[in-house]
Image (cartoon, helix red, strand yellow):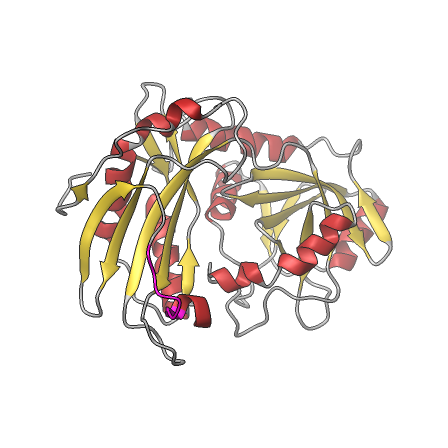
C-alpha cells in the first residue's frame, strides 16, 4: 500500500504495552498507544494525524451528542506467520462505513484517509497485535458530527477517528439467546442496515433485561409481527436445517450486512453447500427442532467471528441444542476463517491486506 497522504505522527513518550497481560485480555478495556484523527471542515478533509491515545476536546453542543450523527466500524488486525501485520477485508469496512454515512446524512470518508490512516496507526502500534490463538487487535474506525450548533440539520463538519485495542475471544462459551417479542431493533425504512450508534443505544435496555434473565443476547425479530428472525445485538445469524445453511435476507433493510456474514456465505458456496438466503420465522425454527432436523444455529460477526447458539427462548418455549448439535459446520467455518487471517492456509479470496 503506497502512502500518498502527508500524515503527521506524534508518538507517545511512554508505551503502556508492558502493563498488559496479553493472556488475559478483557474485550474493549485496554487501548493501544495511539489513535488516528482527521477532520472535515465543511469542504475538505484536513490535518490527518497520528497522536497518543487520549481524550478529544469537544463542545457539548456538537450534533453527534444531540442528533445522533455517529457511525462506526469494527475490524481486526492480525500477524501472519512472518510477523507482518495484516487486515481482514478492510475495503469492505470502508465501503460499509460510507453506506452508513449516506444513510445518516453524513460526509463520506475517502478511501485514502481510511486505508492510510489504518496503515499509519498500525505502523506505530504493530507490537500491540497479539498472536495467541483467537486473539487480534480490534480496530474501531468511527465518525461523528462536530457542528457547534443546536439545530436539527445535518452537520457540516465531522471528525473521523481510528483507535484500537487488543482482544481475545468475545464469547468463550455457546450462547443462550432470548427471542424478543416486545422491543424492536429496526423497522423497514429505518436505520437497521446502517452501523450507527443509535441502533446500539436503543437495544441496551432489552439486552440488559435478557441478561438479567440468564441469557447472553437478544435474538431480534421483525418489527411488525415479531415472527421473522433477523439478527442478534452484535451478529448475523445462520441456521442449519438438515444439510442446508439458511441466513435471513437483508432485502428489507432491517439487518446489518455483516462482512463476516458475507465471508461465511463465500466459503459455503466454495464448498458447494446448499445455501438459502431468505426470510425464516421463529416458528419454522421450532418446527425443525421438534422434527429433529435443526442441526446448528450460530452467530457471525467481527468481534465474535463464529459463536454457536445452544439455547433459544421464545414465549416460554426453548430450543436446547447443547449436547445435540455437533457444531460441525460452524467449527469448520470458524477454523478456516481464523487460519486465513493468520496465514496458515491460502487466502483464495484476496481477503487479507498486508500493512
Q: Where residue 102 sits in the image (x, y, percent)?
A: 36, 68
Q: Main secondary structure of the magenta part?
A: loop
Q: Quadrant location of residue 39?
A: bottom left
Question: Which part of the image, by quadrant, shows the C terminus?
Answer: top left
Any part of residue 18 in sight? yes
Residue at screen point 62% across, 57% down = 204
Query: Which residue reaches farthest top?
Result: 82
Whole-percent x, y for residue 37 in the image: 27, 50
On screen, residue 36 above or below 43: above
Q: Taking 100 as reference, is 345 above or below it? A: above
Q: Nearer the viewer, residue 105 or 336?
A: 105
Which residue is rendered at x = 52% and y = 22% of the image?
23
Residue 251 screen position, x and y as percent:
53, 65
**Total marks placed:** 0
Look at the image and tell me whether residue 89 can be seen. no
Q: Is residue 61 magenta?
A: yes
**Quadrant containing the N terminus in the rendered view:** top left
Q: Is residue 209 magenta?
A: no
Q: Which residues are magenta?
A: 57-63
Q: Position of residue 256 (x, y in %)?
A: 51, 58
Query: Toward which corner of the image does residue 182 lie, by quadrant?
Result: bottom right
Amino acid at each position: 500500500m503506497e502512502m500518498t497522504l502527508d500524515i503527521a505522527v506524534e508518538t507517545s513518550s511512554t508505551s503502556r504495552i508492558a502493563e498488559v497481560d496479553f493472556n488475559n485480555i478483557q474485550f474493549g478495556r485496554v487501548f493501544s498507544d495511539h489513535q488516528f484523527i482527521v477532520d472535515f471542515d465543511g469542504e475538505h478533509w484536513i490535518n490527518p494525524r497520528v497522536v497518543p491515545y487520549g481524550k478529544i476536546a469537544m463542545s457539548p453542543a456538537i450534533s453527534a451528542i444531540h442528533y445522533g450523527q455517529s457511525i462506526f466500524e469494527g475490524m481486526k488486525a492480525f500477524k501472519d506467520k512472518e510477523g507482518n501485520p495484516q487486515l481482514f477485508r478492510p475495503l469492505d469496512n470502508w465501503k460499509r462505513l460510507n453506506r452508513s454515512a449516506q444513510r445518516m446524512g453524513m460526509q463520506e470518508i475517502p478511501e485514502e484517509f481510511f486505508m492510510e490512516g489504518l496503515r499509519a496507526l498500525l505502523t506505530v502500534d504493530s507490537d500491540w497485535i497479539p498472536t495467541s490463538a483467537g486473539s487480534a487487535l480490534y480496530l474501531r474506525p468511527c465518525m461523528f458530527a462536530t457542528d457547534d450548533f443546536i439545530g436539527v440539520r445535518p452537520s457540516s463538519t465531522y471528525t473521523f477517528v481510528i483507535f484500537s485495542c487488543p482482544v481475545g475471544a468475545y464469547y468463550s462459551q455457546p450462547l443462550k439467546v432470548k427471542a424478543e417479542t416486545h422491543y424492536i431493533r429496526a423497522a423497514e425504512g429505518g436505520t437497521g442496515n446502517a452501523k450507527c450508534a443509535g441502533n446500539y443505544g436503543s437495544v441496551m435496555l432489552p439486552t440488559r433485561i435478557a441478561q438479567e434473565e440468564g441469557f447472553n443476547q437478544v435474538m431480534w425479530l421483525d418489527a411488525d409481527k415479531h415472527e421473522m428472525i433477523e439478527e442478534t445485538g452484535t451478529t448475523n445469524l445462520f441456521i442449519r436445517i438438515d444439510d442446508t445453511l439458511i441466513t435471513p435476507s437483508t432485502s428489507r433493510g432491517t439487518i446489518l450486512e455483516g462482512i463476516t456474514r458475507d465471508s461465511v456465505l463465500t466459503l459455503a458456496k466454495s464448498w458447494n453447500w446448499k445455501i438459502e438466503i431468505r426470510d425464516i420465522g421463529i416458528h419454522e425454527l421450532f418446527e425443525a427442532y421438534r422434527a429433529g432436523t435443526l442441526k446448528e444455529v450460530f452467530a457471525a460477526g467481527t468481534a465474535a467471528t463464529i459463536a454457536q447458539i445452544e439455547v433459544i427462548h421464545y414465549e416460554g418455549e426453548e430450543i436446547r441444542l447443547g449436547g445435540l448439535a455437533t457444531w460441525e459446520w460452524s467449527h469448520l467455518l470458524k477454523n478456516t476463517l481464523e487460519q486465513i487471517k493468520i496465514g496458515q492456509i491460502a487466502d483464495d479470496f484476496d481477503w487479507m491486506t498486508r500493512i
